[in-house]
Image (tube, rainbow, N blue to C red):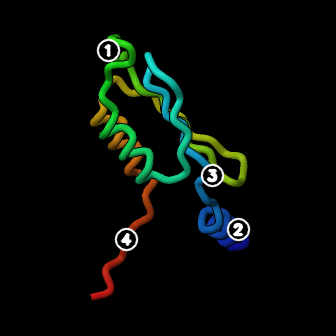
Amino acid sequence: MKEFVASLEAAATRQIRRILILPLHGEVCDVTTVDAAVQFIQNYDGKGGGKPVVRYEIQVSYNNGNEIRGEFNEKASAIEFLRTFQPVRIDSD
């Protein structure tokens, strides 16, 4: 039971510190929220000096030192990955 409580506490207190997005042909975008990361990708024109995006590299860093990385060939896949880090919203109806 102690192990479960410790695991639950760690998950509940873990916060995203930053999200790095690297469109492979451009510069790194360093943001601190999932919404900002999604907005960056949605608004990114993909031109990068006339070169097409080869892939998006994303690194999610947490305040406890953990990191999760992903590499995606398409915008939609990158956004889908980022959305998995958004907190569950509970309607209070």
> Percent x, y for residue 17?
63, 52
Disc 2 on helix, strand or loop? helix
Residue, disc 2: 6
> Percent x, y for residue 70?
48, 32
Q: Mark 2 and 3 residues: CB-CB less than 8 Å, in contact?
A: no
* Looking at the image, residue 89 lies above or below residue 42: below
Decide which of 20, 65 is in the foreground and name it: 20
Question: Separation of disc 2 and disc 3 at Cα?
Answer: 21 Å
Q: Amino acid at mark 2?
A: Ala
What's the residue at 38%, 14% (across, down)?
Answer: 49
Q: Quadrant of the N terminus?
A: bottom right
Decide which of 33, 68 is in the foreground and name it: 33
Disc 3 on helix, strand or loop? strand
Question: Separation of disc 4 and disc 2 at Cα?
Answer: 23 Å
Question: Separation of disc 3 and disc 4 at Cα?
Answer: 20 Å
Looking at the rendered image, the disc whose residue lies closer to the viewer, 3 or 4, is 3
Q: Mark 3 and 4 residues: CB-CB less than 8 Å, in contact?
A: no
Image position of 45 (left or right of 55): left
Q: Amino acid at mark 4?
A: Arg
Q: Amino acid at mark 1?
A: Pro
Question: Separation of disc 2 and disc 1 at Cα?
Answer: 45 Å
Looking at the rendered image, the disc whose residue lies closer to the viewer, 3 or 1, is 1
Residue, disc 4: 89
What's the residue at 40%, 67% (across, down)?
Answer: 88
Residue, disc 1: 52
Mark 4 or mark 2: which comes first in sequence?
2
